[in-house]
Image (cartoon, helix red, strand yellow):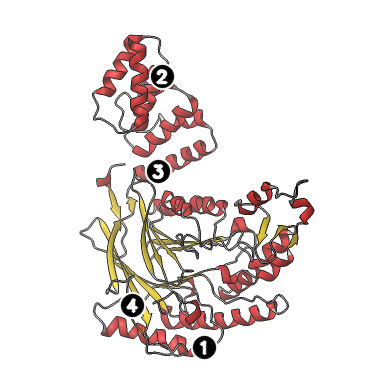
């Protein structure tokens, strides 16, 4: 598919209100009416009176911690029900004031405060000391390894220095049941939320803005004894399948989850950034999260070779009190503008931080332009690549074929995938990468030499050199080595090692 045969997304300017961590702090609660009034007043301030003016929001993202939650199992159900009723009232008011009552344009996900510890506590039982210690009264290390393993049912409690095990998964999964009920009721039955961890994701597609927002639960296996954030791998995979058709339409893909992906040395209540690598691989360009109660912008790269990246925005806490705010940080929220200039191959993405003034009261805040880190700036603009929309049937058909072939490769049906790939134009980089994978998996060295006679990547060069090692004919091997030597030099140590092996066999 040639770049000059494509067109790009058509939205001109999109504004996203990004709020997070709505939990009200004991002793410094803020009620809904002054909170909604403060946000509405601030919208008038930044859209009409300040410079630069900010476009009023078209979409709202709420990246988790809808309620404070309860630490008292005896009153958990009633207290959480009351907190969700308060949150529902606030979010309805927000939608009415900012989106004209259109709930389809607000994206909501759970956070760790939405996890009900009552059910995680009831789902576990203590592992007796006799099971944990060996005959020498020393710890059996497998218990410690299980306690830190990603999918383990074993937990360690520092409070009573004991191991626990989840023995009732059905009850454990009910940790998110109250959020699921709130979710269904808020969206008036149009959207549902599963308590099955494999199904805790959602997709919000907006053709009018040509964007898709993927929504993840980063509280997989999060409970009162494991505070770490994580996303079930099947959720990421299922999102990938759903994105295929949308990306063929040229959607700009965004994602939201709750946990931050960086932490201090002794922290462990954050999400491993390996999930971001998966997001980048899915073609997600921008991410939104909360949890750390501090607005931030980071660039996340897939790897040092390809330099594929996404940008990630963190929102501060909208309602947290003094004890929940990082040093020197006040309550915050974000507005992100995405601008498409017709004469540019890039999209301009601008982060605006709004922050409660230090002189205003927690129960009746006034918002103003905030600060990005320690810099004395309230907004920052950067550029990302525009998504590409195929504009003819031939390209769409080729995309469809490639997607089907990719599924064959995922299913390890390499011979079938090779047969289909050889029918396509191998000038397409994605097709070449899939074919290379099939050749390597099937050790089809003759095909490697046939289709990669003029190798374009380190992988193709390595395939040729491995093929050369299989030939007893020194003349043929010498031709391959000479061909590789004529190419621009590579820093890949694997190529040099294979060259040396081949040259020893030529002598």
How many angstroms separate mark 4 from mark 3 (CA)? 44 Å
Query: Pointers 2 and 3 in contact (CB under 8 A)?
Result: no
Return the disc, 2 or 1, that comes first in the chain's sequence: 1
Callout 1: SS: loop
Badge 3 is on which residue?
399
Badge 4 is on which residue?
370
Rendered image quadrant of residue 474: top left
How many angstroms separate mark 2 from mark 1 (CA)? 72 Å
In this view, the residue in front, 289 or 342, is 289
How many angstroms separate mark 3 from mark 1 (CA)? 51 Å
Callout 3: SS: helix
Are there few (<14), some (14-19), or many (20+) residues within 10 Å of tag 4? many
Q: Nearer the viewer, mark 2 or mark 1?
A: 1
- Say the numbered circle drawn on residue 31: 1
Return the disc, 3 or 1, that comes first in the chain's sequence: 1
Badge 2 is on which residue?
446
Q: Look at the image and tell me whether residue 219 can be seen.
A: yes
How many angstroms separate mark 2 from mark 4 (CA)? 62 Å
Callout 2: SS: helix
Residue 380 drawn at (x, y percent):
28, 68
Residue shown at the point (23%, 30%) measured from the top left: 488
In this view, the residue in front, 81 or 399, is 81
Q: Look at the image and tell me whether residue 209 can be seen.
A: no
């Amino acid at each position: 598919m040639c770049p000059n045969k494509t067109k790009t997304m058509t939205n001109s300017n999109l504004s996203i209100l990004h709020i997070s961590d709505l939990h009200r702090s004991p002793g410094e609660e803020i009620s809904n009416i002054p909170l909604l009034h403060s946000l509405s007043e601030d919208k008038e301030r930044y859209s009409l009176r300040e410079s630069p003016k900010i476009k009023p929001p078209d979409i709202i993202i709420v990246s988790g911690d809808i309620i404070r939650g309860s630490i008292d199992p005896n009153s958990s159900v009633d207290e959480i029900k009351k907190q969700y009723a308060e949150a529902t009232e606030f979010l309805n008011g927000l939608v009415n004031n900012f989106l004209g009552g259109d709930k389809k344009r607000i994206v909501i996900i759970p956070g760790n405060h939405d996890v009900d510890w009552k059910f995680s506590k009831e789902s576990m039982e203590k592992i007796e000391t006799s099971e944990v210690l060996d005959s020498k009264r020393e710890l059996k290390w497998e218990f410690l390894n299980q306690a830190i393993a990603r999918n383990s049912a074993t937990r360690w409690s520092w409070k009573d220095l004991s191991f626990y095990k989840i023995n009732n998964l059905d009850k454990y999964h009910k940790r998110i049941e109250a959020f699921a009920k709130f979710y269904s009721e808020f969206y008036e039955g149009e959207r549902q939320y599963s308590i099955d961890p494999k199904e805790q994701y959602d997709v919000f597609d907006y053709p009018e803005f040509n964007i898709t927002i993927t929504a993840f639960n980063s509280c997989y296996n999060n409970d009162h004894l494991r505070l770490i954030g994580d996303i079930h791998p099947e959720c990421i995979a299922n999102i990938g399948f759903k994105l295929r058709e949308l990306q063929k339409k040229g959607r700009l893909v965004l994602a939201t989850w709750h946990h931050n992906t960086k932490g201090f040395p002794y922290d462990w209540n954050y999400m491993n950034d390996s999930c971001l690598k998966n997001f980048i691989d899915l073609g997600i360009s921008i991410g939104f999260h909360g949890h750390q109660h501090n607005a931030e912008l980071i660039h996340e790269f897939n790897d040092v070779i390809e330099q594929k990246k996404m940008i990630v925005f963190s929102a501060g806490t909208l309602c947290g009190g003094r004890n929940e705010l990082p040093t020197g940080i006040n309550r915050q929220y974000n507005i992100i503008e995405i601008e498409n200039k017709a004469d540019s191959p890039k999209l301009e993405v601008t982060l605006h931080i709004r922050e409660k003034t230090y002189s205003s009261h927690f129960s009746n805040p006034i918002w103003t332009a905030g600060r990005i880190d320690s810099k004395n700036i309230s907004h920052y603009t950067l550029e990302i690549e525009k998504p590409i929309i195929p504009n003819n049937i031939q390209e769409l058909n080729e995309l469809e074929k490639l997607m089907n072939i990719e599924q064959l490769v995922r299913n390890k049906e390499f011979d079938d995938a090779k047969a289909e790939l050889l029918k396509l134009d191998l000038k397409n980089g994605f097709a070449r990468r899939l074919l290379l994978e099939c050749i390597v998996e099937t050790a089809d060295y003759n095909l490697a030499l046939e289709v990669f006679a003029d190798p374009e990547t380190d992988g193709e060069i390595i395939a040729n050199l491995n093929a050369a090692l299989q030939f007893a004919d020194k003349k043929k091997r010498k031709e391959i080595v000479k061909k590789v030597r004529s190419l621009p030099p590579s820093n890949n140590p694997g190529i040099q090692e294979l060259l040396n092996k081949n040259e020893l066999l030529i002598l």
